[in-house]
Structures are given as C-alpha cells and as structure tokens.
Image (cartoon, rainbow, N blue to C red):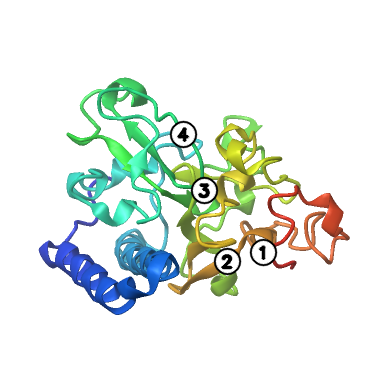
Amino acid sequence: MEKQCRLRPNDVMIVLACIALVWMTLGAVGETGRRRAKEVVCQANLHRWGDIFGGIVEENGGKFLSGTNSKGHWWPMQLSPDLQDWKMNRLWLCPMATAPMISEKGKQSPTLGAFTAWGVYTEAMVGYAGKTPASGFAGSCGLNGYVIPIPESLGHQTNTYERGAPATVGWGSLLEVPDAGRVPLFLDALRFDVWPLHTDQPSAQESLVWAADNHMARCAINRHDGAVNSLFVDGSVRKVGLKELWKPKWHKAFNTAGPWTKAGGVQPENWPEWIRPFKDY
C-alpha cells in the first residue's frame, strides 16, 4: 500500500500558527513557559498525525500500513513522499527534539539523549534504493508496532513481531479496538517503531537511553518533565507519565499489571535513580 495520504498545504501553516500563538502566550514566563509551549506544539503535531493515520485506516478497510516485509518494518516508506520527508513534514519532530542523531552528512551527534531525534535515515542506510525521500527520514516520535498488520503465519511457522510476540496479538482493524483510549498509537520515542513488552526495564541511566536494549526504554524518556506525549487509537492525545508507560494496552495480550506496575508489585527502590522521583502507577 503506497502513498495513501498527503500533507495538505495548510497543515504547515496550522502548525506554524500554533507555535506562534503558544510562544506569544507563554514565552514571557521563562524556561518553564518555553518547555510548556513546546509540549503544546508536540501535542498539536500528534493530533495532526491522528488525522493522517485516520485517513490511512479509513482507506485501508480499518487497517494500518503493513510495512515493507512480514515483520512490518519500515512503515514510513509507505507514506506519500511529502509525508515521509522530514524537511517537508515537520510534524515528525517534537520541538524538544529536533536534531537527528546522524546529520545529513553522516556525522553522529556528540550527545544522545531524550532530546535527540532519530535519523537521518537515507537510501544507503535503509537498503531500499529509490524509495526514501530526498532528505531522508528523521523524527522524534514512534509508532506502536503492534498496530501494524502482519501475516499470522509464514509457511508452516507462526509469524511473530520483532520482539517475539505472535502476530495474533496485533490489533488488526483499528476500527474494532476495545477501549481504544488505552492503546498507544504514536508517541515520543527514539525510533519510528517500537514493540514494548511488559517485562521491559527502563534504562539504568538517563544518559544511556539510546543504548538500552529494549523498546519500552525507547519510549520512557524524560522529554516532557517526567512524561511523554502520546496519540491513542481513539484519536485522543495526552501526557503519559514515564512509569505509566507499562499500564496501557500495547497489544491484545499485554499484561497491564506486569512487574513494573504497582499492581504487579514494583517497589520505589526497584526503579533506577533517575526515574524514581516520578509518579507511580
């Protein structure tokens, strides 16, 4: 499925107007006001993504993009070029994280953290010649990979998502998701797709989030004062506390009372020191 939805000409103007309004309103109250202004713009961007994804789902019989292979990888390559290109479509970027980890000249950023964007991914990095947009992919939000429909089997073998969860736990039609306001769709993240597991641990140190070897740690990043912004399948957008990220229903079988929740018995001292002061869930 290719080029399903395009960035309308007035979308950029809407975002720019939102930025201007927020900065005029909050810019005079110091650093706290500036962070809040960026948070509001980030949420506005996610609302626009909700409109874009809604159009894709409607055109695709209730399903999201399939990705480029049986695992659902590289879903952005199925967007129209104007949506793909991070310079044409600034909705990719949370205002708190606008500098990609790798520059267009291939140089890696000297600092990697919650305020670093992913990319820039080019044709040479992706391996799909002629597919990537002129400026490549880059951004600071990621898709809940379990909304991508993948085949339930490959020959005689059960197919799984990247982290090993069976394809059957994926959401399938997004028009039939129960309690859709609890299912993340697109949120602040360190890559454009994530497949969290309920057993995933937060990064041991805040400065090492990019080195974490699990996908929940790619979302549990202190970008908005102890929280991230998230778009949910029902189209709502809200802040999600870092410790709250283990509570939403990421896939059909996700344990929302797992070991990193109060219901699952997590203790304050179990959390790494950097995340410990934030609200418990």
Q: Residue 161: in sight, yes or no?
A: no
Are there few (<14), some (14-19), or many (20+) residues within 10 Å of tag 3? many
Sequence-wise, the earlier of marks 2 and 4 is 4
**Residue receiving disc 3:** 145
x and y, in percent, of residue 224 in the image? 50, 61
Identify whether 182 is placed above or below 191. Answer: below
Q: How many marks?
A: 4
Q: What is the spatial separation of the Cα atoms under label 4 and label 1, in whole angstroms?
A: 27 Å
Sequence-wise, the earlier of marks 4 and 3 is 4
x and y, in percent, of residue 116 in the image? 43, 42
**Residue receiving disc 1:** 244
x and y, in percent, of residue 248 in the image? 64, 64
Q: Secondary structure at mark 3?
A: helix
**Residue receiving disc 2:** 240
**Residue receiving disc 4:** 111
Given residues 98 and 69, the one toward you in this image is: 98
Q: What is the spatial separation of the Cα atoms under label 3 and label 1, in whole angstroms?
A: 19 Å
Discs 2/4, front = 4
Discs 4/3, front = 4
Q: What is the spatial separation of the Cα atoms under label 4 and label 3, in whole angstroms?
A: 27 Å
Q: Is residue 125 left or right of residue 218?
A: left
Sequence-wise, the earlier of marks 3 and 1 is 3
Q: Residue 242: in sight, yes or no?
A: yes
